[in-house]
Amino acid sequence: MIAEGGGKESGISKLRRGIWIEGDIMYVAGEEFIEKVASALASLTRLRIIGLTFKGDMGIEDLADKLGQSKANISTHVKRLEEANIVRAVYLPGHRGVKKMAKPAVKEIRIILSELGEEVEERIKEAPLPPEEVEEEYKE
């Protein structure tokens, strides 16, 4: 679980920033944390992995077979989901060593957007977007 305390010093007084889990619900607040979770969810392969983990125990090899992808590719996607606390790895004895299983870490993700306005104002004062990012946003 990743979390930061309430942010009076950062200008965010009502809500803590970070990623935290209560029961089977993940809460995400703060632009860099929202970006991390959204980025982990921004892949059709990773969304399918999440869906399959809710169907039952799925090892890397099982996921690779179901999705028609290499074990290395699936392992990379699972690692990304683990880093965002969306799935968790469980290691079980296998035929030749240990088998890595992917299980859902949460059933629901709630992204708190209401505090972004205040946070963005503070961040802009501290450091505006670099010119290359501004140019990229205008291209879209």
Image: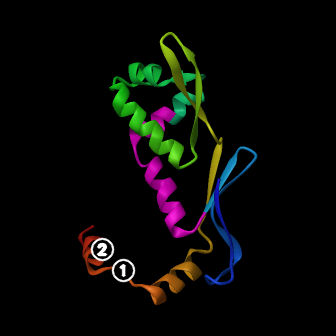
In the rendered structure, the answer to whether residue 27 lies left or right of residue 32 reads right
Report, in whole angstroms, how far the alpha carbon at label 2 lies from the one at label 1: 6 Å
Determine crowd level at label 2: few under 14, some 14-19, many 20+ residues with C-alpha closer than 10 A. Answer: few
- Position above or below: 113 against 39: below
Give the quarter of the figure containing the C terminus: bottom left
Three-letter residue code for mark 1: Leu
Q: Residue at x 76, y 46 (%)?
A: 23
Residue at the bottom extreme, as displayed = 125
- The question of residue 119 being in magenta is answered with no
- Position above or below: 3 against 117: above
Query: Where residue 108 sits: x, y (%)?
Result: 65, 46
Q: Quadrant of residue 64?
A: top left
Query: Where residue 48 sits: x, y (%)?
Result: 46, 34
Query: Where residue 6 sits: x, y (%)?
Result: 70, 74
The residue labelled by disc 2 is: 133
Query: Where residue 39 sits: x, y (%)?
Result: 44, 54
Three-letter residue code for mark 2: Glu
The magenta span reads: 29-49
For the residues labelled 2 and 1, say whether their Cβ atoms are less than 8 Å apart.
yes
- Position above or below: 51 against 98: below
- The question of residue 33 being in magenta is answered with yes
Residue 43 numbered mark, or none: none
Q: Residue at x 53, y 49 (%)?
A: 84
Q: Residue at x 65, y 41 (%)?
A: 107
The residue labelled by disc 1 is: 129
